[in-house]
Image (spheres, rainbow, N blue to C red):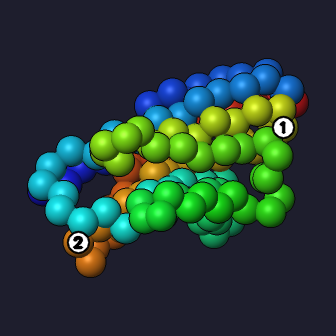
Amino acid sequence: QVELAESGGGLVQPGGSLRLSCAASGDIFSIGIMGWYRQTPGKERELVARLQSVPGRGFVADFLRGRFTISADNDKRSWNLQNSKLRVEDTAVYYCYLAADSKTYWGSGIQVTVPS
């Protein structure tokens, strides 16, 4: 059974930075895509960033480019979302996900709060 665990969320002042991490455990044979979504109350979950395992190509949503970056450790079992210049509107629950072995796995979500 594959499980994802997020860490690194919390409260950060506007303009600050935060690093979210996701660690995958369990039997994984072929990793396709690692990434992050976020969701605020009353809104649909939106893509933040994703990273293809091969050839290691990363994508960040246009409205976040320049402030958010995604990276993965060499073993591809953990990946990170570096958030900088955070804004109030970045407040959300952030979910990591993994597409592997023809399945999609989700973390339980972690709260990031940027107070006004």
Query: Taking 113 as reference, is 24 above or below it?
Result: below
Query: Taking 92 as reference, is 85 above or below it?
Result: above
Question: How many numbered markers are drawn?
Answer: 2
Quadrant in which residue 63 is drawn: bottom right
Image disc number at residue 101? 2
Look at 79% across and 42% down and name the residue there.
67
Look at 65% across and 27% down and name the residue there.
18
- Say whether residue 115 is left or right of residue 108: right
Q: Position of residue 37 (x, y in %)?
A: 57, 58
Image disc number at residue 87? 1
Any part of residue 82 in sight: yes
Using the image as rendered, state which of residue 54 and residue 15 is in the foreground.
54
Q: Earlier in the sequence, mark 2 or mark 1?
A: 1
Look at 18% across and 58% down and name the residue there.
28
Which image quarter is the N terminus in? bottom left
Q: Secondary structure at mark 1?
A: loop
Quadrant in which residue 87 is drawn: top right
Q: Position of residue 36 (x, y in %)?
A: 54, 54
Image disc number at residue 68? none
- Say whether residue 82 is left or right of residue 97: right
Q: Position of residue 30 (x, y in %)?
A: 24, 66
Q: Are marks 2 and 1 in contact (CB under 8 Å)?
A: no
Query: Taking 106 as reference, is 89 above or below it?
Result: above
Marks 2, 1: nearer the viewer: 2
